[in-house]
């Protein structure tokens, strides 16, 4: 008589990012056996903290953390799991300017930055002009034109624009005229830059719902990863190549040829991986995933490997450098710098405790396609040129001496390549396809037999799509769904001192969760539980 299939775990989790580790941590706390399979040689996925150091050649540059991926906790509130977890673990955070979730702010709050005109010698743009653009955007209902806005950034001639962008060009004067906000239906180049950058954030505010302040982590997202992996079994450096499911089990085969079996699996890899944009990370499902799911995932992903996505360039100078002491570290220095160069947005990390560091965001919808083909040093040079246009060279005191660059080339830098990374294939899910919608996220998240799908791309926009807390919510919800199906029940029933209650995780927070209880489970790796009542004498 057969004892049935032998399982390596109750649940196989593909991906050791925030979603996967959260799911495994919750499963473990409530008696489930989870095995996490990760393609990379490291944990964290797109939550990647590396280190910039000058080494022996630059003793003035001590080691400092650099966030290659996640950098912010967006929409901090009592319902934000990572914000509460940071407080629970004693991880320092710093409240960022803006992102208060009101009508006129966006997730990077471009409208409250210090604005400089790169085409006019770094001239400061008066705050009145920025406010005008912030007030103009909602009046034009530009938040509804999610695809055509790329026209404002591309700088391409009309004949090279996409059909959607051309429609946007035609509609824009009509919208301006209808709004009644101004007499002229056209915008000059400076106004276009401001409207583009502010418009690019409006949709994010709507998605975040009742968002609170933003908080950058000072010790890095690695602190969360180190917490979540406690008690969790992870196999690194072996990409999953095949997922095969029957009516009773899931079998997964990795690149090395190893196979693992379990009753269920949770798929947390990025959408670009599921869209099969690179053979190194491609996963074959047997039976194949439904056509509508594949189509939805592709609409939420980059169109191809190397397409534009949100990238970062972190620059680091010695604190003794005049640009650091006189600009980044000056009294009253801005926390964010904006420019009419539509590729770049700068966050002054020096003011947040990362000495000598300036972070440059490169937006995906700015369509800076050259980023993918330039070397790291060439990308840094382009960013430095952008900074020099904002902070031009100062005239030398001696007429015979050349002008001095106010922004020297940095001795240290980090350039991200999320669009080329075969195990990321994008910084996060995006609406690059004009047909993409929130419905696609619902289809993406739909279980398929014994397979559950989650991650930042598979949660609703108002819950935290594209964000780290969305990944945590998704991972926790997937774990609870399987625990409710009986995963870990035998171990829970065997406990004599405590009886874990799955219901304690449910509440009135996002995705029906009790966020403070979830945070306690993530922090301790244990369920809250309750003492068993002794039988009456």
Image (spheres, rainbow, N blue to C red):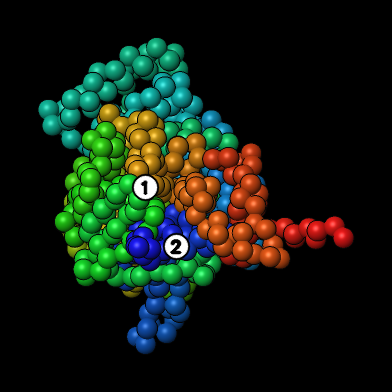
Q: Residue at x 75, y 60 (%)?
A: 531
Quadrant occupied by the C terminus: bottom right
* x then y, percent, for residue 59: 42, 84
- In the shown orientation, is residue 520 left or right of residue 199? right
Q: Give the label on residue 34, or none.
A: 2
- Determine crowd level at label 2: few under 14, some 14-19, many 20+ residues with C-alpha closer than 10 A: many
In this picture, is 231 found above or below 29? below
Mark 1 lies on a secondary structure that is loop
Task: Give the camera-side residue of 400 and 380.
Answer: 380
In this picture, is 271 found above or below 166? below
Mark 2 lies on a secondary structure that is strand
Q: Residue at x 16, y 56 (%)?
A: 279
Q: Residue at x 25, y 18 (%)?
A: 170
Question: From where the camera sits, is residue 516 visible?
Answer: yes
Q: Residue furthest left?
A: 159
Q: CA distance from mark 1 to mark 2?
A: 15 Å
- In the shown orientation, is residue 406 left or right of residue 495? left
Q: Give the label on residue 450, or none.
A: 1
Q: Residue at x 36, y 16 (%)?
A: 175
- Determine crowd level at label 1: few under 14, some 14-19, many 20+ residues with C-alpha closer than 10 A: some
Task: Give the camera-side residue of 532 and 36.
Answer: 532
* x then y, percent, for residue 3: 38, 63
Task: Give the camera-side residue of 23 and 61.
Answer: 23
């Amino acid at each position: 008589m057969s004892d049935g299939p032998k399982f390596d775990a109750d649940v196989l989790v593909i991906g050791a990012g925030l979603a996967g580790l959260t799911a495994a941590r919750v499963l473990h706390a409530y008696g489930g056996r989870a095995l996490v399979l990760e393609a990379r040689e490291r944990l964290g996925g797109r939550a990647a903290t590396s280190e910039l150091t000058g080494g022996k050649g630059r003793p003035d540059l001590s080691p400092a953390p650099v966030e290659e991926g996640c950098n912010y906790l967006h929409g901090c509130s009592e319902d934000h799991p990572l914000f509460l977890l940071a407080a629970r673990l004693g991880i320092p955070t710093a409240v960022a300017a803006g992102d208060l979730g009101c009508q006129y702010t966006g997730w990077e709050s471009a409208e409250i930055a210090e604005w400089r005109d790169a085409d006019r010698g770094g001239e400061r743009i008066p705050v009145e002009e920025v406010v005008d653009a912030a007030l103009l955007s909602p009046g034009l209902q530009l938040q509804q034109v999610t695809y055509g806005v790329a026209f404002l950034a591309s700088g391409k001639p009309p004949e090279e624009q996409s059909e959607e962008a051309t429609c946007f060009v035609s509609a824009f004067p009509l919208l301006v005229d209808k709004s009644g906000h101004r007499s002229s239906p056209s915008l000059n180049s400076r106004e276009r830059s401001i409207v583009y950058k502010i418009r690019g954030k409006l949709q994010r505010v709507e998605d975040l719902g009742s968002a609170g302040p933003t908080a950058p982590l000072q010790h890095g997202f690695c602190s969360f990863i180190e917490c979540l992996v406690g008690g969790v079994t992870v196999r690194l450096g072996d990409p999953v190549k095949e997922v095969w499911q029957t009516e009773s089990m899931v079998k997964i085969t990795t690149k090395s040829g190893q196979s693992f079996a379990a009753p269920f699996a949770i798929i947390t890899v990025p959408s670009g991986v599921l869209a099969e944009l690179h053979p190194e990370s491609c996963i074959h499902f047997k039976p194949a995933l439904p056509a509508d799911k594949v189509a939805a995932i592709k609409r939420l992903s980059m169109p191809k490997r190397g397409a534009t996505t949100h990238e970062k360039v972190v620059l680091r100078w010695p604190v003794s450098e005049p640009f650091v002491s006189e600009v980044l570290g000056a009294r009253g220095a801005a926390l964010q710098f904006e420019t009419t160069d539509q590729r770049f947005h700068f966050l002054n990390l020096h003011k947040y405790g990362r000495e000598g560091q300036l972070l440059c965001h490169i937006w995906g919808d700015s369509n800076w396609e050259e980023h993918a083909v330039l070397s790291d040093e060439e990308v840094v040079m382009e960013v430095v040129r952008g900074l020099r246009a904002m902070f031009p060279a100062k005239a030398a005191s001696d007429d015979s001496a050349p002008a001095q660059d106010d922004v020297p080339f940095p001795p240290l830098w980090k350039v991200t390549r999320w669009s080329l990374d075969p195990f990321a294939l994008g910084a996060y899910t995006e609406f690059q396809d004009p047909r993409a919608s929130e419905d696609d996220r619902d289809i993406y998240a739909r279980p398929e037999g014994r397979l559950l799908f989650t991650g930042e791309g598979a949660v609703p926009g108002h819950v935290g799509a594209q964000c780290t807390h969305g990944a945590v919510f998704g991972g926790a919800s997937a774990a609870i769904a399987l625990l409710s199906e009986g995963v870990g029940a035998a171990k829970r029933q065997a406990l004599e001192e405590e009886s874990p209650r799955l219901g304690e995780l449910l509440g009135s927070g996002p995705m029906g969760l009790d966020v403070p209880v979830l945070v306690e489970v993530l922090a301790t790796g244990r369920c809250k539980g309750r003492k068993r009542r002794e039988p009456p004498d």
